[in-house]
Amino acid sequence: MKRVRRSVLPLLLLALLAPAASAGPAAAAPLDRLVASGLARAGGVSGGYVLDTTTGRTLAAVRADTPRIPASVNKLYTTSTALLRFGPDATLTTGVLGVGTLDDAGTWHGDLYLRGGGDPTFGTASFDRLAYGLGTTVAALAARVRAAGIVRVTGRVYGDESFLDQLRGGPASGYALDLDVGGPLGGLLFNRGLAREDGSALQRRPAKFAAQQLTLELRRDGTRVSRNAATGATPAGAQQLAAVDSPTVATLVRLTLVPSDNLFAEMLVKDVGARFGSAGSTAAGVAVVKRTIRRFGIHPRIADGSGLSRADRTSPRQVVLLLSALRANASLRAALPVAGRSGTLAARMRRTTAQDRCQAKTGTLSNVSALAGYCTTRNGHLLAFAFIENLVYTPTAKAAEDRLTVALARTRPADAPLTTPVAQPTPAPGPAGGGAAPASTGR
């Protein structure tokens, strides 16, 4: 770390000691030289943008408007849209509905339908505890069926995944099952689509698997189910008998961003498509994302929810405009990894000025690295920044990102705002109801 500090600080001091009254780009963006030098160390082709959100002043703009592959920084668009559209306190419901009648002895004469609501945490208590520390459990749902007075079912449990489409992957895999996503996508997932809790096998038919698990749990809970599980859409007119709600959307966003969970991101983009778009599909969800962030004056090319697709393109300035607009959004800020402390930044920038002062979303694909987030400077200014590098050796690029982020945390930007403040984006709507690095999973 000492060698890194000696190499960065001289450039930083030169930038900060430049005459304040001088004309040209150096006056408008005092950290241009610092950022340009840092990105040059990353190699490949890269760009960066740093905005002092406290004063509205651009501190660095280095190829800031060139769109590049963002990798998992793309998750910022997905999760921001989920927070703005659903609202942070909203939940996703998994329900049991019935077609039939309940007699006085507690026998349900008919079938039950397990209807998924796009909740990526639905599963067993043991799996949720290990994977997330919380979640929606089949045991809780079975207990609520029992609490509805049902002690026997003459029919069967049908798994209904029609809330979302049945494409198991995203654009990066041609919508086929993608191991980088971490499991099959679907409107009714159980334990992330894993057939075994240790992750050694995947489910072939997620909706049927979930229905089978509810059938088993009902039987364990003392409710007799006469027939084996199957799949099918819930008929019109079915009555809701029991339901469980997911963790809040704010929590789902945190579970997406902190570990950079591709499955959660792809589920969320389909969820916003189902609720606020034309269908529960990636394409419909992406359309909602684009409409939502357009109000911030940004128009990135978005193909998926996770950033696994190399068709995604965005510029550092676009990412920073989003971050600046949402700087007061407590749910987004709480969901970002903290330098040296948590998630994908837990092992980065430890014991540096950036630790606990900076939080950011990482991005990694083969030959792609990115970092975007916030830093609080030594004099209390909040900076929003984005660095995106393509055609790079990712370990080298990440080291360069870390040096730059540490340098940002050390700065003391001028307190005076620009004479002409940076235009603020239109608020988003509230809730409506160069070597090759090893292949990575988009973190």
Image (cartoon, rainbow, N blue to C red):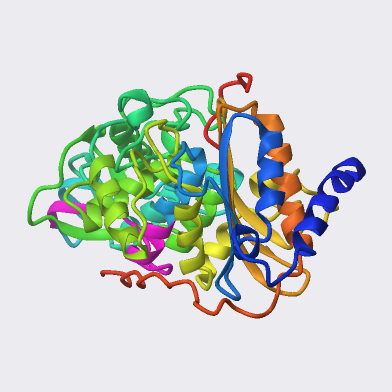
Please state which of residues 61 and 395 is positioned toward the viewer in this rendering.
Answer: 61
Outermost residue toward the left in this view: 236
**Residue shown at 60% from the left, 29% from the top:** 44
Please state which of residues 271 and 235 is positioned toward the viewer in this rendering.
Answer: 271
Please state which of residues 322 and 215 is positioned toward the viewer in this rendering.
Answer: 322
Outermost residue toward the front in this view: 23
**Residue shown at 51% from the left, 58% from the top:** 320
Q: Position of residue 245 (x, y in %)?
A: 38, 60
**Residue shown at 38% from the left, 58% from the top:** 82
Locate residue 170: give its quadrant: top left
Q: Position of residue 240 (x, y in %)?
A: 21, 60
Q: Is residue 74 inside the magenta stretch? A: no
Outermost residue toward the right in this view: 2
Q: Is residue 96 inside the magenta stretch? A: yes
Q: Is residue 107 left or right of residue 52?
A: left
Locate residue 186: give its quadrant: top left
Q: Is residue 136 visible?
A: no
Q: Is residue 260 visible?
A: yes
Q: Which residues are magenta?
A: 80-101
Above or below, 117 against 310 in this view is: below
Above or below, 414 against 82 in this view is: below
Q: Is residue 272 left or right of residue 13?
A: left
